[in-house]
Image: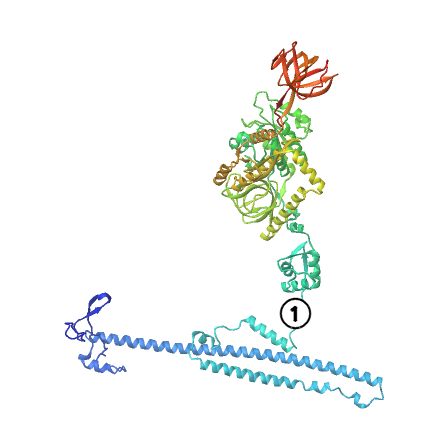
Amino acid sequence: MSDSDGKKTLGLGRGPGQVKQSFSHGRTKNVVVETKRKRVVVPKPAGGGGSAAPNARGPASGGDPKKRPAGITDAELARRMKALAAANAVEAEEAEKRAADDKARAEDRERRRAEIDAKEREEQERAEKAKAKLEEEDRKKREEEAAKASAAAASAAPAASPEGAAVPSSAPRGGTKPAPVKRDRDNNERRDNKSSRARDDNARRSGKLTLNQALTGGEGGRQKSMAAMKRKQERARQKAMGGAQEREKVMRTVQLPEAITVSELANRMTERVSDVVKSLMNSGIMATQNQSIDADTAELVIEEFGHTVQRVSDADVEDVIAPIEDDAADLKDRPPVITIMGHVDHGKTSLLDAIRKANVTGGEAGGITQHIGAYQVTTDTGAVLSFLDTPGHAAFTSMRARGAQVTDIVVLVVAADDAVMPQTVEAINHAKAANVPMIVAINKIDVPGANPDKVRTDLLQHEVMVEKMSGEVQDVEVSAVKGTGLEELLEAIALQAEILELKSNPGRAAQGAVIEAQLDVGRGPVATVLIQNGTLRQGDIFVVGEQWGKVRAMENDKGDRVKEAGPSVPVEVLGLNGTPEAGDVLNVVDTEAQAREIAEYRANAAKEKRAAAGAATTLEQLMQKAKEDQEVAELPILVKTDVQGSAEAIVQAMEKIGNDEVRVRVLHSGVGAITESDIGLAEASGAPVIGFNVRANASARSTANQKGIEIRYYSVIYDLVDDVKAAASGLLSAEVRENFIGYASIKEVFKVSNVGRVAGCLVTEGVARRSAGVRLLRDNVVIHEGTLKTLKRFKDEVAEVQSGQECGMAFENYEDIREDDVIEIFEREEVERTLA
């Protein structure tokens, strides 16, 4: 840049200057630069130099007003100087306090270090004394042994030299033994002094003093813990006592199942896995820690390590839920459990609705009960009763059996206008098998034509004698519609419960029975459980059948959440890992591991049982079964229901459908909605899918439409059984029936060219048709059966010939015709068969 380019140079004056900045691509920018003088404030002592502060500029500035900072008065300057002096005083006081604290910490560190050193010296001296005492005892023992040996030698050889009776050389060696102890102590002290001097030199040479070093006295950030100090002292004591002693091995009793992994075996023996693997390798068995070995091999390994073997079986895992005898003092009264049983449509649910003042029947499909329900009712007198409502349809036999097994009292409902029916008899048998007392409720006494006495008379045929017939069974006439006799029924139940003296222990772990189970879309697997003993609480871990879980929530029969459920209380339990079977027993266990182990054992046992039941024992039996299956037509179906009890009832009903020619085979039955996997199984087996009170999800419906799989929905078990029975009937071969339509006798036989032998006949009975079948009878014996080749009346071919007329007949592929033979004419028709 030249001086003649017209640009102003940048000066150092007071006024603002301009600088031109150049950028790439020819861009420039003017920048204004202004320098400002820094304002300096110099304190001025009051009184014109009367202050004794060691500030060299203080008197000069105070004496010379020109050098005083601009805008500062004498009073302001005095205040500032006073504040400065106070700050200096505070700073000096804090410095003194810090110095005193540092001195106190240093003294405390020295005191602690001295205590530790004194303690170590005491321990060392104690160990040295113990070592010296042991050595002295050793020496004396050796001297005594040597003296005994010399005395024995002297008595054996009295003529021996006097040197043989001299004191053994070990005695003087033992007498000078404490000298090395003192030498060792001096060496240790010199070593400690040398290490402390080295530590002090390192601390002195370290350049910076950190906060960590200041607080710990230069020893670093961590000091030894008390456990480390004790271990150090123990090692020193063992060293002084003559070396480390081996820890005594603990012999254990090892529980050995039928099969066990190598790692679990090592864990139960508290041995290292590598040692167990090495032992197996020495025995010629190459196994890793995750492989299983049999019980015999594991027993050899356990005995090799010196432990004791205790053989256990897989079934021992259920010992934790073994029945416990309750103390009589812990037993308390519990509500009775009443099961209402009877024939279908005899008013069981309506009677319970009248007692509960509810309307369950209105919500049942078809007006019939198809699930087992559990309810708890509080009567007007304050008594609490637990009711079980069972279905009356013939398909729900297992449900009624379960209800009879968990109940205390059975209320047998019989309609006064219908008397004893098949399911009534079945309910009586269930009650007798369970040894449960029975109360007969004669319902529908308000219906025209009701005859309660006929009900009592019919019950006598089944060994049920009511009180009015001089028996012991209570009977009550009731009307569920009008509410007649309900109070008498509740009084009879209360009287029977009082006779039974029902008691249980609510303080023990809960035990109950699964009345019903279902798979809810929003809540997962849900089980209706009747608590029989103990108290079930939220958070309890339990095992039920092949499933286990933790009580996440409980709901009573009204849908309210409860925290606990005592004896005879029905609740819905949420928190299972799967849907249990109806009738399974619920037991509360201590830990989740126990519950999982018991559930896995039960699942494996059930799987092995099913495999053993389905396997053919011999090849001949397998071939025979395959031959029988070839002769029997099967109708495969898939069943999905809303609850487990309905699935069980439907499967049992399907097994009863069929005969020697056709049968229904349930490929799969489950609880919950119809899924895509169900459609896949149905496609592979060519089976329809039946949904009972459930529906298919969207993906399952679309897949079924694409693949042409039929899905049928039902809500009443009557319709389901009838439709399946009709479908199975379609697999039956049609029944062929023969209808005899006429007879003809042969009068003469002709031979016609291009036709063969033709019989001249007289139709003696019925009609002769060209399309019908014929049999040739000779002396009432069938000679031939076939069809007609031709049927002529005079010279014309006709379709049929009536009785009393003559005609000509020729058989198809048969010519052995004689006079006086009889021709039987018949027609065949196929009749469809149905399953009974």
Say which amino acid is labelled 1.
Answer: Arg
Q: Position of residue 106 (x, y in %)?
A: 46, 78
Q: Is residue 751 above or below residue 666?
A: above
Q: Secondary structure at mark 1?
A: loop
Q: Would you say 607 lies left or right of 818 here?
A: left
- Residue under label 1: 247
Q: Is residue 154 above or below residue 760?
A: below
Quadrant position of residue 27: bottom left
Q: Which residue appears at 17% of the width and 79% of the height? A: 66
Residue farthest to the front? 753
Residue farthest to the top? 804
Q: Position of residue 609 (x, y in %)?
A: 66, 44
Quadrant that contains the C terminus: top right
Q: Is residue 99 visible?
A: yes
Q: Nearer the viewer, residue 132 or 284?
A: 284
Q: Nearer the viewer, residue 340 or 808?
A: 808
Q: Is residue 7 above or below residue 531?
A: below
Q: Position of residue 323 (x, y in %)?
A: 66, 47
Q: Is residue 374 visible?
A: no
Residue farthest to the bottom? 162
Q: Which residue appears at 72% of the width and 86% of the height? A: 171
Q: Would you say 553 lies left or right of 781 here?
A: left
Q: Nearer the viewer, residue 2 or 249?
A: 2
Q: Nearer the viewer, residue 271 or 360?
A: 271
Q: Is residue 379 above or below residue 605?
A: above
Q: Would you say 8 lies left or right of 804 here?
A: left
Q: Position of residue 396 (x, y in %)?
A: 60, 34
Q: Which residue appears at 70% of the width and 80% of the height? A: 137
